[in-house]
Amino acid sequence: MTEPVLEVEGLSIVYQTEVGTLPAVRDVSFAIAPHESFGLVGESGSGKSTLAMGAIRSLATNGRVTAGSVRLNGVDLLSVSKKELRRLWGAKIGVVYQSPLSALNPSITVGKQLAEVGELHLEMNRAEARQRAIEMLTRVAMPDPEAVMLRYPHQLSGGMLQRCVIAMSLTTNPALLILDEPTTALDVTTQAVVLDLIADLKREFDSAILYITHDLGVVTRICDTVAVMYAGETMERASLRDLFKQPLHPYTLSLLGCIPRFDPSPEKRFLATIPGTFPHLDDLPSGCVFSPRCEFVEEACRTAHPPLVEGTDGHLTGCRRWQMVSLLAEKLRGASAALPPFTTPPGDEVLAAAHDVKTYFSSYRGLIRRRRAEVKAVDDVSVDVRSGQTLGVVGESGSGKTTLIRTIAGLTPATAGVISMRGLQLASTTGKRTRDQLKDIQMVFQNPDASLNPRQSVGDAVSRPLVLLCGLSKSEARVRAQQLLAAVNLPESYDERLPEDLSGGEKQRVAIARAFAAAPGIILCDEPISSLDVSVQGALMNLLMELQREQGTSYIFISHDLSAVQHLSDWIAVVYLGRVAELGTAARVLRPPFHPYTEALLSAVPVADPDVQQRAVRLRGSVPSAMDVPSGCRFHTRCPRFLGDICAQEEPPQRENAFDHWLACHIELQELARLQEQTLMLTREAD
Amino acid sequence: MIEPNAAHAPSPMATAEVTSGRNRRASWILYWRRLKRRPATLIATIIFVGFFGLAVIGPLVAPYGYADMDMKSLLKAPSLAHLFGTDEYGRDVLSRVFVGTRNIFLLSGSGTLMAVVIGTTIGLLSGYVGGRWDEVVMRLLDVLLAFPALLLAMVLLSSVGPSNLNLVLVVTVLYIPIVARVARSMALDLRTKEFVEAARLRGERRRYVLFHEILPNAMSPLMVEASIRFSFSIFLVASLGFLGLGVQPPSADWGLQVNEARDFISVAPWTLLFPAAAIAILVIATNLMTDGLRQVLASGLDTE
């Protein structure tokens, strides 16, 4: 075996805070060989970023390494002088952070910032450094690098910026490249492109890659070896295939179970969940840190801290009972419980409908407010929601999905079109709607931190709609609020709490209870789970499905995450630039023929299974501005199945595939189906 | 309808992620710990509280009446009988400073309070409603802000005549635009927050949204602004007193005292020194306290 590039041994890191010393990382070891890419996976708070930053001595000021050693090409990083460390940072280590916009200086051109690296660390003169910068931009597949050199960061899209940062970090051909969630802030289609790029660069450069992510799907595209972190410790470390195919730790097993799989069968099941919550660092459980939430726990797990042992060949696990885990893994995988039946079976009648809805925003230019530019956020959209069913809406950011549901809710007035509920037309703003109409439509918002009033107790938040919309007295509402909290699986004692005492997932549960309080006919969910951890996402999806079955409520569920949408939805609308590209039942939309955009979205979703072969359909660039919508088919500028002039000039016809499925494309449905059937998206080796 | 009856048993698959919710350490312990680490704030707070106490009980503990003249001891230097000395009428400077504390707290305090209440209401409404109404209100307040504060106060007071009530009203008028701006910016920020949208979605009245959803979350910046306004109005009231447009003789007022003492500065500097020092110390203490408390009372962990 070759000499490893990075060798971390027994590293422990603490943070000094007001509440005491928090042991953020405890006794973690790993090594990365040249050309190897090593994945650090974990939920938020697992210490994965702290570990990486601690290893290169780049911690926040209150962080401190308390034990262990770190060697980079044999040099002990923890004992070198500050001056030497700075040299090593520049020449040997490249770091790419989550947000490309804050990694670059907004007032200096991209080219200057790139060239600076060459001048500073490779002792090049100006012309050489510039040449090197252009070369690097070319290698990260940047279109027209010379022009990009002259741009300022705000003039580039997120995907292009991230490419610049990657180019910058690779300029010195560093021994170690640390990628800290580099694609988390990007759209799924852009993420796919950047991941392809990283996979290519991995082959071209000698750098060892340390890849930090919370997304198990992303890991399968990039990494050779994976370590799973939990509460500051390594739970399991193995090669990618071993980890996904034969996990030897209950935590890994549970995490894999939390992810919704693409499964077009109509029978819905619960996702697996992990009971309990993430431990606080100042109050860690004794024994195994995962023991309070573990299905395999036995008495000995709670008392003695288990060491990391080698289970099968080269596969390390921190579980005492890994043999049991490996024996039962297959059984547990398919064992998620079936959903309860509907109390009232969903009907086919349309509950809520939007017809030819247009929502435009005017922006004024200049002081005198004369010239107007129109942003066509939603442009002629018609969708129906049937009672007791879920309509999923997917699309990249900027596709108008949030504006659509805000228009339906009456928070943003429609420019044109009709919104109706139970067959009756609704006024376009909340102020003009009747109490019964208001009661019928509620919303769950994206950001759990902003959706609850920080100064209002949980009980007040949930009981307020009952007082206002259902006419209950304050004390009646209070009692009822307690029952609602129980229905979203929060203890009664929570009604006195303020939002700041709740975790993100708990806040969303309260928001769901508040939305259900007045017993609405439909609840509009605006990416309610996208900011939460994988295991919490699973639990919330379970809750939403369970409540739907009990109450017969309809949902519109919007998300950029196609796997979540397909798991929850009966119907799916794929929207692009303010217009519906494809609409149909979930089963139909997920089978060919697809709209080319749907096809690209599907192929971009990282699937957490190394055996799934996805056909790479990649989109160029990002969504065009809604102020300047492309002519003809809106998608033609990025379409991988672009035909020619017809796409650029004529609006595509709506082609009916079945009574419950249509898509808008110039290509004949049979032709689309034939093209897409040839390279079926998900081909499983095992099947 | 969610029918949560006694039989509702959450299914095991959906119960995940229910925490016992660790109780955070009582916040006042945290505040005290932070306060201890900021001695300047601690001392400033003690001084401020001291002055406030003096404002309440000042006349009771003053050794002499504030207007009692003693013609036998004019302009006497500080001594055991008169700790701060006496002024040109033989009045005890210490007693006048003590009694003046109450005046300054009453005048500045009520002026500030009115400005905060009215300014907050105008600002919140203006920011939340937006549009043309916002435009008109804010431009009107801009006009008020365009005048130098002291000049405007002098013009107003000389036209309506100096009295305690007018003084308070002038402080109020001067500070309304400044408070309103702060309140407006908070409303602009908070009105787009999702909890406010949730309130609109259930058809809450404007008044409820303003005073139950927005105001409580704007409280801490408003409190900070209020204390800054308070320290400035101490200055203002003292300045106006000095210019003869504030509290009228023979009342005890620090600004007035400084004015009267001007003529005797070479023979009896104590008559000027003590009220001037009182003004300076109270203003500095108020500022330091405001500054520090803002950090002490901030939410979230302090990693310093």
Image (cartoon, grey):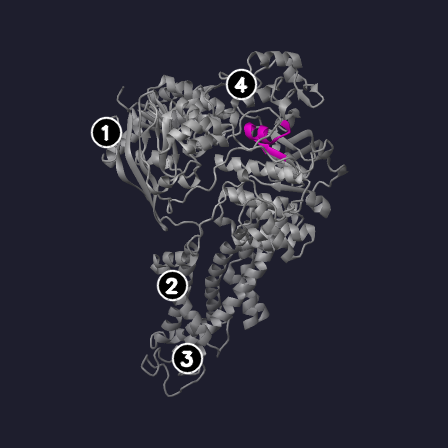
Q: Mark 1: few, some, or many residues within 10 Å (few <14, many ≥20)?
A: some
Circle 1 residue: A75
Give the chain of mark 3: B
Circle 3 residue: B61
Q: Position of residue A305 (x, y in %)?
A: 33, 39
Q: Is residue A464 left or right of residue A96?
A: right
Q: Tell me which amino acid carries mark 1.
A: Val
Q: Quadrant of residue B57?
A: bottom left
Give the chain of mark 2: B
Q: Residue at x 55, y 33 (%)?
A: A337
Q: Are marks 2 and 4 on the same chain?
A: no
Circle 4 residue: A682
Q: Is residue A420 visible?
A: yes
Instruction: State how far apart marks 2 and 3 are (Cα).
Output: 23 Å
B5 and A489: which is toward the camera: B5
A182 and A384: which is toward the camera: A384
Q: Is residue A161 visible?
A: no
Q: Tell me which amino acid carries mark 3.
A: Val
Q: Position of residue A99 (x, y in %)?
A: 44, 33
- Report the disc number at residue B44: 2
Q: Mark 4: few, some, or many residues within 10 Å (few <14, many ≥20)?
A: some
Instruction: State how far apart marks 1 and 4 are (Cα).
Output: 45 Å
Give the chain of mark 4: A
Instruction: State how far apart marks 3 and 1 are (Cα).
Output: 74 Å
Q: Position of residue B192 (x, y in %)?
A: 58, 44
Above or below — where is B293 with respect to A121? below
Helix, strand, or loop for circle 1?
Answer: strand
